[in-house]
Every structure is written in structure tokens, then in C-alpha cells.
Image: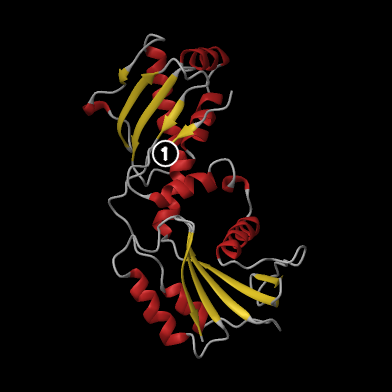
Amino acid sequence: MATRFWTVLPIHVGDMMAHQISHGSENDMTKVEMELKYFERMASLAKMPLMPNTIKQKKPPAPDIECSIQDVGPLAIELVALDSKNTQTRLNNMFRTSDCWEEALKMRPLMEQERLRVSCKNVFLRLEISNEAGNRNRRELMRSIQEELLKRPDDFVGELYDSEEFPDNCQGVTVIRYDDITDGPQISAPSDFENLHPLQIEKIKEKLTKKTYETSNPLDLFAYSIFDGINIYVDRLVEIDACVNEHLADSRFRRVWVFDLALGKLEKTYHR
């Protein structure tokens, strides 16, 4: 029985995009496949009609993408994601939570597995987990939660732990039951947005000043945020302006395109 993973997204629209991309899709995709997915979305936002069967993904020193644009001709695109490393780690940890439940469940005796599957089929499990808790920590937490559930009546609802008994990396576990849930436990483990990290604008400078590319096609740079959002940080677009205006003229690139994939929009285009 598959465990679905619900996420509460009260603040950051970028995490909604992250959930749409990652759950059930990005986790199973290679880096090359993900880059192609993002490129095709950005080309659409840039109103670049791609010619069928012209997209090529080559290894460096070639740019990430070579393609042909209708009524324009050949074009090469280098891609650069601007999201902070902290954001990617935080979201990867969040999206892995439901998988960790299943991994922990499979380690239990068959009778316990069956009891938990039956008793949790209408459960909505609300967790408060540290952002930094990785796969091993979350799997151990799931093991602890399952152990605790096995001690309770099969219709238990409420807080699973007293505050002084919380497992490591956990600040709360709430068991809720809903009549319309039949494939539980459905798990909500929202990540914390308090410690947002800045976009990696220095990556744009690196592409413009430190990279060499082997291509005979005109060359553009697609800079994008998948999760964080370009304008969620004060003055970030101003900083991008300054970086591009300083380095674009002396680079190999004709244009720099800046995309906010969390909002599904092209933020700005710079020309030499």
C-alpha cells in the first residue's frame, strides 16, 4: 500500500512548486532529465518555440543545451540554478519522509506490519521534524513512531509523545483520523522557513566570467530559481542586475534570462 505525503505550505510558494516537481517525479529523475524538464519549461516561458527533435544535451565544455528555435535558428543554452544549497537539502529531506515510513515498516515483523497498515489506514500524521534530519534520522523517527503506535489502541488519536519524551530531531507527533482517508498514513512534515538562505548570485558571475564553452551556436544563459523565488529576498533582483551589467559585455553570452520557476514566470532578460 503506497503512503502518500501531504505537505503544509503556509508561507513559501516556492515549496509548492518544489512539491509539484519533486514528489513522484524529480526523485526518480536523473540530473540530465531534470535539466531538460526545466529547460523546456523556461523555453515556453520565454516564448521560444522549439523545433521538434533538435534538443541536444552534451557534456562540457559544450553548453548544457543545443537546440533550434522556430524562425530563429540554432541556439545554445547554459543553465544555472540559483537556489541555496540549504534549500535543496531541506526539501529533499522533507520529500523523503513518507519513504522513510515505508522503509521502517518493512523492517518490522510481518504481524506488526499488518497491524500498522490496518490501524493507520485512516490516519493523518502531523510531524514536526528538524530541517536537518536526513534519511537515517527520519527512518529512525518512523521506527520510533511505529513502536509507539503499536503500544496504543488501534483507534488512538492525539499527541503521541509528551514534550519530555520527544525522539531526536522531533518536536511533535500528532495522530488524526479522517473518514475520507483510506490509504493512510498520510504524512505532513512541513519544513521550517525561518532560516531562509540567499540565492547563489555568484553562480551567474561564474558562468559569465570563468567558464569556456565550445559551440558554434549563439549562446544564452538561463538563470533560474526552482524553489526559493527570485523576489522573496530583499534586493536580490537588484544584485542580479549589478552582476549581469558588470560581466555580460565581456562574456561569450548574448543574453541572460532570469526565471522564477516557483511562480512560473520570466523575471527579466538582459541583452549585450
| Number of numbered discs | 1
Considering only vertical position in the picture, is 121 above or below 31? above
> Which residue is situated farthest in the front direction here?
71
| Residue 49, horizontal then vertical, whole percent | 67, 66
Front in this rendered view, residue 272 or 78:
272
Q: Choose top left, top right, bottom left or bottom right for residue 212.
A: bottom right
Q: Residue at x 43, y 42 (%)?
A: 94
Q: Residue at x 44, y 46 (%)?
A: 16
Which residue is denoted by mark 1 in the rendering?
137
Tell me if mark 1 has few (under 14), some (14-19) or many (20+) residues whose alpha carbon lies within 10 angstroms of its own.
Answer: many
- Name the kind of residue labelled 1 in the image: Asn
Considering only vertical position in the picture, is 33 above or below 2? below
| Residue 79, horizontal then vertical, whole percent | 56, 69
> Which residue is situated farthest in the right direction here?
53
Q: How is the image coloured?
A: secondary structure
Q: Residue at x 44, y 48 (%)?
A: 91
| Residue 232, horizontal then vertical, whole percent | 34, 60
| Residue 36, horizontal then vertical, whole percent | 64, 60
Q: Residue at x 54, y 31 (%)?
A: 103
Give SS at disc 1: helix
Side (left or right) of 265 relative to 52: left
Q: Choose top left, top right, bottom left or bottom right for residue 128.
A: top left
Q: Choose top left, top right, bottom left or bottom right for residue 10.
A: top left
